[in-house]
Structure formats: C-alpha cells, structure tokens
C-alpha cells in the first residue's frame, strides 16, 4: 500500500483518547480470555485509566428548580352573549358531543 499523501495529525487530546481506547480494548480482551495479563500489568493499566478517565461517583442533586411560565388567555368578556359570539366558531357542535 502506498504511503499517505495527506498525513493525519492528531492533537494531544486525540492521542490521549486513542491510548485510553487501547487500554480498554486490552482489558476487554483479558476479561474475555483472549489474552493473559499479569497482576502487575492489570494494576499499571488501572492506574493509567484512573489518570485518563474521571472516576464516576454517585452524586445527589438537591435544591429547587424555579421555572417561569407565561399563560396567554383571552381578554375577559362581561356578557355571555358577547363571548359566545366571539368564540362560537371554536366550540364543538352539539351533534358532535352526542
């Protein structure tokens, strides 16, 4: 295969992610029985993963969340006849209710 013309240049963050992925793959193969690791290799890999990945802890969030809601209502109407005249087209027919 010919050499690449446009070489890929990864930044430090990407290189670190690739190294972590390699460690995870190696541990996965060990757990699946595909390769053997010595206790020293397992301990060293654990230390490297602890440095690279954050340790997940259970976190309890307490407090109240305040939200504001706006409800838009039609202006008040003093007479029933005026309300019926204004909103009669939006009311269901009496036939539809039965």
Image (cartoon, rainbow, N blue to C red):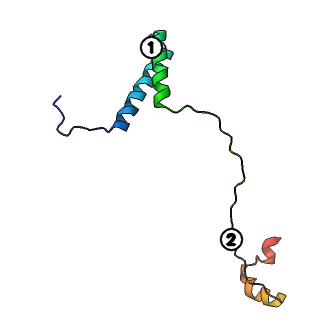
Q: Which residue position holds label 2? A: 70
Rendered image quadrant of residue 9: top left
Front position in the image: 65 or 32 = 65
- Residue 28: tell me if it is visible: no
Q: Position of residue 75 (x, y in %)?
A: 74, 84
Q: Relative to 64, does residue 22 appear above or below in the rendering?
A: above
**Secondary structure of the residue carrying numbered label 2:** loop
Mark 1 vs mark 2, foreground winner is: 1
**Secondary structure of the residue carrying numbered label 1:** helix
Answer with mark 1 or mark 2, whichever residue precedes in sequence.
1
- For the residues labelled 1 and 2, say whether their Cβ atoms are less than 8 Å apart: no
- Structural crowding at the residue carrying mark 1, measured as other residues with C-alpha within 10 Å and reported as few (<14), some (14–19) or many (≥20): few
Report the Cα–Cα distance between label 1 and label 2: 60 Å
Quadrant where the N terminus is found in the figure: top left
What number is the disc on residue 55? Answer: none
Q: Which residue position holds label 1? A: 41
Q: Is residue 53 left or right of residue 88?
A: left
Q: Position of residue 60 (x, y in %)?
A: 68, 40
Q: Position of residue 94 (x, y in %)?
A: 81, 77
Q: Position of residue 66 (x, y in %)?
A: 70, 59
Front position in the image: 33 or 27 = 27
Q: Is residue 34 left or right of residue 12?
A: right
Rendered image quadrant of residue 22: top left
- Residue 83: tell me if it is visible: yes
């Amino acid at each position: 295969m010919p050499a690449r013309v446009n070489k890929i240049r990864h930044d430090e963050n990407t290189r670190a992610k690739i190294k972590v992925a390699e460690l995870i793959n190696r541990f996965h193969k060990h757990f699946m029985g595909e390769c053997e690791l010595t206790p020293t290799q397992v301990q060293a890999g654990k230390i490297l993963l602890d440095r690279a990945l954050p340790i997940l802890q259970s976190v309890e969030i307490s407090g109240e969340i305040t939200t504001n809601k706006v409800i838009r209502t039609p202006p008040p109407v003093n007479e029933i006849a005026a309300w019926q005249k204004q909103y009669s087209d939006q009311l269901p027919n009496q036939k539809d209710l039965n």
